[in-house]
Amino acid sequence: MELLKEELDNEVLPLLRQADLYRVQAARNEVAEAAQRAITRAVDTMQATLPEALPRVADEPPVETQTSPLEPEPTLAARELRINFRDQIWIIRIELANDPAQGEWLSVSDQPSTNSQPQIVEIRVSMAHPFMVSFAQTDPD
């Protein structure tokens, strides 16, 4: 049995290691439905908890973040949330993307307000990132 195991996992064709890394990906419509449920739940939770959390955040110094908008990308689900923070209106955009070419698991942009636009924070999570494929494909919780 050991000899068979060695042959199935040799350097020329490491079948056992490949099988360990194999995951059956959920169908696109299942992923899209789960993404929609998850993003709705996340925004609902933010609406319920941000009023209590924001005063603590306001006492902290701002964190340096990319100020240019995130590059446009097809999304599975997207939502916006308007909040009042530091005496300004802010828009928080949350997106779940599914582009396998996207190497970042999490992308964040914090765009300063202008005369015509409020402060905009963009948060994008890549559902195609190996972390999400392994742990969060169809379970919205």
Image (cartoon, rainbow, N blue to C red):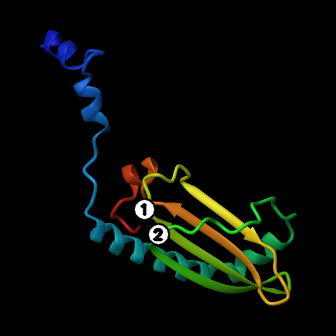
For the residues bearing labels 1 and 2, Cβ distance under 8 angstroms: yes
User: Which quadrant is the N terminus positioned in?
Assistant: top left
Q: Position of residue 116 (x, y in %)?
A: 80, 90
Q: Secondary structure at mark 1?
A: loop
* Residue, disc 1: 98
* Residue, disc 2: 74
Tell me the kind of residue under disc 1.
Answer: Asn
Q: Residue furthest top?
A: 3
Q: Position of residue 56 (x, y in %)?
A: 79, 71
The image quadrant that residue 76 belongs to is bottom left
Q: Given this view, does label 1 or label 2 mark the residue nearer the observer?
A: 2
Q: Secondary structure at mark 2?
A: loop
Mark 2, other Cα within 10 Å: few <14 / some 14–19 / many ≥20: few
Question: Residue 7 or 100: which is nearer the viewer?
Answer: 100
Q: Position of residue 108 (x, y in %)?
A: 66, 63
N-terminal-most mark, 1 or 2: 2
Picture residue at 35% right of the left edge, 71% below the top: 32
Q: Residue furthest bottom?
A: 116
Picture residue at 47% right of the left edge, 69% below the top: 74
Q: Is residue 70 left or right of residue 102?
A: right
Measured in 3D between alpha carbons, the distance from the residue under mark 1 to the one under mark 2, in whole angstroms, is 7 Å
The image quadrant that residue 9 belongs to is top left
Picture residue at 51% right of the left edge, 53% below the top: 102
